[in-house]
Image: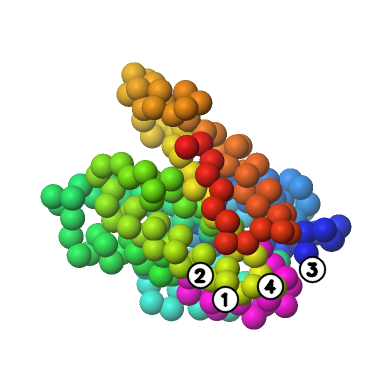
Amino acid sequence: MNASSKDPRRLLVVGATGRLGAAIAKALVQRGDHVALTARSGPRLEALADELGASGERPTTVCADLRERGAPEHIAREVLATGRLDGVVLACGPFPRTPFDELTREDLEQTLLVHAIAPLLLVNALAEELERREASVVALIDAGVTRPYPNHVAYLTAKGALQTGLRALAVELAPKVRVNLLALGVVADPEADEDPLRMHRLAARSPLGRFGTPAEVVHATLALLDATWATGEIWGVGR
């Protein structure tokens, strides 16, 4: 199945309980797609599934911690046991602050596991089904990979590894599977930062003079999911 089909697709959202993951999952359901959800927090995952299933099919949920060995294979087995899969959205969300003078081996290892190693292994575990369905993979990465900012060495290192790995997979899985990335600038989160002056100062650094919104990330994600003539691309949004 490809993006031109009118039949509903079934997509896996990884990191579904994060702010962006949840927004993407909701948008997919609203446009008529079916979703499967995975995240680390069981209660939040079930609450989101209840919300999305209130007016239709309740999503499959797989509670898994990507830091645990075997998590990618577990997610793949559980999702495929309940039906087909037409695409994956990688929206892994942890954003650890790791100043360089406090950086530890554990910081790097744990962040690489969540943001790079586990997502790549998950796509690998799903590869046969993704090829059969001529599926699409879209990952949220960070514009900071090419324009670094301070105090997030582990996170930016991991996102850089994911970017390189997925672009390699775009070649490995072609021509059946499309693999694309969204390199995001700062997406506003008023609840996470209550200092309006700081927010204004940071936003002023953007050429557009403001931060992005979850709705704008959703719009770009759906566009890449549906893009039938693009693979290995990195779309910069909000830089």
Question: To which residue does mark 4 refer?
Answer: 175
Q: Residue at x 43, y 45 (%)?
A: 143
Disc 1 to disc 2, how far (Cα)? 6 Å
Position of 38 relative to 71 (above/below): above
- Quadrant that contains the N terminus: bottom right
* Residue 10 falls within the magenta-colored stretch: no
Query: On the picture, is 116 further left or further right than 181?
Result: left
Q: Which is closer to the viewer, label 2 or label 3? A: 2
Q: Nearer the N terminus, badge 2 or badge 4? A: 2
Query: Element under label 4?
Result: loop
Query: On the picture, is 107 further left or further right than 167?
Result: left
Q: Specify the amino acid type for callout 1.
A: Glu
Q: Which is closer to the viewer, label 4 or label 3? A: 4
Q: Position of residue 43 (x, y in %)?
A: 49, 55
Residue in the foreground of this view, choosing between 141 and 13 = 141
Residue in the foreground of this view, choosing between 97 and 74 = 97
Quarter of the image where one finds residue 46:
bottom right
Query: Element under label 1?
Result: helix
Q: Residue at x 38, y 77 (%)?
A: 69
Q: Residue at x 29, y 56 (%)?
A: 154
Q: Position of residue 120 (x, y in %)?
A: 48, 70
Q: Specify the amino acid type for callout 4.
A: Pro
Residue furthest top in the image? 197
Q: Residue at x 55, y 78 (%)?
A: 125
Give the magenta part as a residue range.
119-137
Query: Element under label 2?
Result: helix
Kindly check if marks 1 and 2 are in contact, taking CB atoms under 8 A apart as contact: yes
| Magenta portion: prevailing SS class | helix
Question: To which residue does mark 1 refer?
Answer: 172
Disc 4 crowd, CA 10 A, few/some/many (<14, 14-19, 20+): few
Disc 2 to disc 4, how far (Cα)? 13 Å
